[in-house]
Image: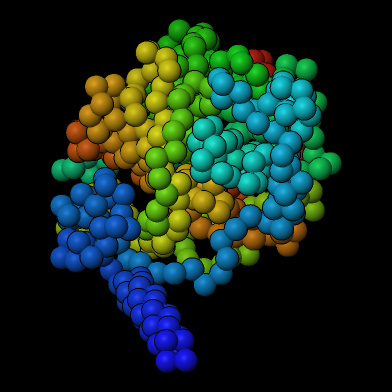
Amino acid sequence: MLRERTRVLEELGCFLVLVILLYGLNSVQAQTIGKTVDKSNVQEYKDLLIPAMLEAVKRGDFILPTANLGFPYKHSNQFLAASGKNAGKFDVNEAGDLIEKSTGKVPKFNIYGYPFPKIDPKDPRVAVKIIWNFNFQRYRLMCSITQNRNIWVGKEVGEERYIAGPEYLIFYQGRPPGQEIKTPQNFLSQEIQNVTEPMSIRGTNTMSWDYFDEREISCFAYIPAIRRVRQTSGVSRSDPYMGSDGWLDLNYGWAGKNRSMKWKLVGEKTILVPFTDINKLVAEEEPNGTMHRKVPITKWGYMVKDWKGAPWAPTNITYVPRQVWVIEQMPKDPYYNWGLHINYVDKETYVIWMKEVSDKAGVFRSWHQHPLHYEEAPSGNNTVGVVDCYIQVDEKARHATLVTRQPHSENQRLFAPISKLGSDYFTMSNFLQLSK
C-alpha cells in the first residue's frame, strides 16, 4: 500500500513538473510576442528568426514589432474540404512531376485543393509534395491583375529608380468547380509583365507559358529598341528582372518548374513572419466573383525621417509566429543563375513566407520576404498567400528591390473569371499589341 502511494505521488510530481514547464514555455511565449525586437534584445528571439533576418536585426537594419493574430489564418472551408477528397489520389514521379496514382501519368483533368492533404515527413519525396501544395493553394486564385511598382533602393541614396505596370496571371489548374478551362496546349499557367513607366522603357514586356507536363517554360521578351520579340529558355527566369535584385521565378516565392529543382525537407520550426495588417478585413466582390483587395500602404525606411535602420526596411509591418517547413531547393540546370535556395513554407497554408538564396559557389547572397494581410469576401474566398509586397535584399551589394502593389482596390483583382481575363489575353498577337 505504501509502495503504491509512493508511485502515485511520484507520477503526480512528474505531472506537476510537466505542467509547470509547459506553463513556463507558454508564459515565455506570451511575454515574448507583443514586444518589439531590435538589436538590444535580438538574442531572446534568435530561435524565431531565420538566419538572414537575425543578422539584419543584429546590424540594426530591421526592427520587428511582434503580435499574435486574433483570428485563424487559413484557407476557405471549401478549399480544405476539396483537399481532403484528394487524399491518396496523387503522387510525384522521380523527376518531380505530379502524377495520378492509378495511372502513373500527369493528370488530364482539373485538380482543386491540395493534392497532398496529408504530409508524411518521412516520405522520401515529401519536399516536392509540399511545393505542389504551395502551387495549388496559389492556383485557386484562377486569374489575377496586379498593378506593381518595382523600386531600386540603395544603402546611401534611398530610392534610385523605379519601373511600374500591370502583371497578368492565369492558372489552368487548381480552379474551383465550374471554373475549369480546357487547354489543348496543356498549359499550367501564363503570365505577362507589362512595363508602362517610365516612358524610356515603356513596352519592355515579358510573357511566360508553363505547361502541365515535362516541357520547360516558354519565355518571350519584347525589346522596343529592335521592335522584336525574343524567345528564351525557361532558365532565363533566373536572370535579374530589369536589372533588379529579384527574378521572375521569385513570384510568390517560387514560380518555376518543380522538375527543374532538387527538393529536400531539412526541418520544421516556428518563425516570425511579416503581416502588413494583423486585422481581418472584408474584401469587395463583384457579382461575377472577382475580388478587389485593398493593399495596406507600407512605409519604408528611406521615407521616414530619422530612421536609423536600412532604407529598404519596412517600418509599419508586424511579425507574427507561424510554424513552417524548411525546404531546400537546388537547381538541376548548370546555367541557372543561383545555387541553393532555402524556403520557409507555412505548415498550415503552404505559403512561402521567406527564402534565402546562395550564389552558384554556395555563398549566401540574398534573402526575400513576402508580407501579406488577410481579406475575406462574402463568398468565402480570401487572400491567404496573396503577397502585398516583396522585399528582395542583396546582402553582398547592400542593395534591395521593393516590389510594391498599388493600394487602390481597382488595381488589385483576384478570382477573375475567364470572361474578365482569359487565355486569349496571353496570345502572341495580344502580347505584341501591349508592347507597341
Residue at far right of view:
178
172 with respect to 179 (left or right) = left
Residue 64 locus on image (x, y percent) = 30, 61
Is residue 419 visible in this depiction of the protein? no
Q: Where is residue 91? Give x, y as percent.
A: 65, 31
User: Residue at coordinates 52% horizontally, 47% vertically from top-left?
Assistant: 351
Residues 298 and 256: in front is 256
Residue 178, percent from left and from top: 84, 41
Depicted 113 relative to depicted 194: above or below: below
State whether residue 138 is above or below residue 291: above
Q: In the picture provided, is 120 more to the left or to the right than 405? A: right
- Residue 244 found in image quarter: top left
Horizontal arrangement in the rendering, residue 363 relative to residue 134 (left or right): left
Residue 48 seen in the figure: yes
Q: Residue at x 42, y 11 (%)?
A: 225
Question: Who's the residue at 45% across and 51% down the image?
Answer: 324
